[in-house]
Image: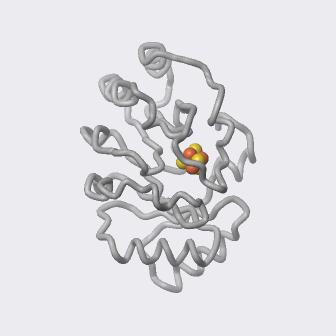
Amino acid sequence: MIGVPMFFVRTNGCNLRCRWCDSTYTFSGGKEADVKTLLDLVSQSQERWICLTGGEPLIQRDAPMFVHGVIDLGKSLLLETSGSLSILPYTFSKRVVIDMDIKTPSSGEERRFFTNNLGYLRDTDYVKFVVTDDIDFEFARKFITEHNLPCEKILQPAWGTDMKWLVEKALDLKMDVRVLPQLHKLLWGEKRGV
Ligand code: SF4
């Protein structure tokens, strides 16, 4: 959802250790906040969209309560997840949009995918493949060919990977995908909180 202003809630902790993780600072530290406090902040924010991200937000015990609370406030929520845990509890509303990674071989975590999630995706959701090289590209191409995914498919060049190379490969093969950059990194580099 590039270009949509969002209020960010970033949880700490992750059950994976992707080789190219750019959020390792979330693996420790952070500040305890209860759901009510977070929902108060959400209700005071100007943004219509809330982004729940991490780390891995689904390891948080209260994640379902928070997501229900956001929807009850009349807002919409983008849930960014690694795909290693069930997304089923978050599919109760189309105002929850799920942005789910399918981890590629370069992550070192591709075997951690919770395959039942493929059956929970809706046409309003996204799956995202981070691509670093030909092996990742071929993995994504094969995965998309073999699974009848109902949602949008996104290829994202890992930071430092040539986006033109990736766009041309996807165009050559007439793949039904969008190739999108990490806009926040193009704009602000490694700055946190954006
Ligand atoms: S799932 Fe995300 S936060 Fe966790 S290690 Fe992988 S890239 Fe980092």
All told, the count of numbered labels is 0
Q: Is residue 74 above or below residue 158?
A: above
Picture quarter containing residue 94?
top left
> What colour scheme was applied to this rendering of the protein?
one colour
Q: Quadrant of residue 113?
A: bottom left
Residue at the image position 73 percent from the left and 44 percent from the top: 188
Q: Quadrant of the C terminus?
A: top right
In depth, the one of 78 and 83 nearer the eye is 83
**Going by the image, does 156 lie left or right of 188?**
left
In x, y percent, where is residue 55?
A: 56, 39
Q: Position of 115 compared to 184: left or right?
A: left
Determine the residue located farthest toward the bottom in the rendered image.
172
Instruction: Residue 44: give x, y in percent of width and height.
Output: 48, 17
Horizontally, residue 170 falls left or right of residue 21, namely left
> Residue 182, percent across and down?
62, 54
Residue drawn at (32%, 65%) of the image: 149
* Residue at x 74%, y 44% (from the top left corner): 190
- Image coordinates of residue 95 in percent, x first then y, are 32, 39
Q: Residue at x 45, y 35 (%)?
A: 59
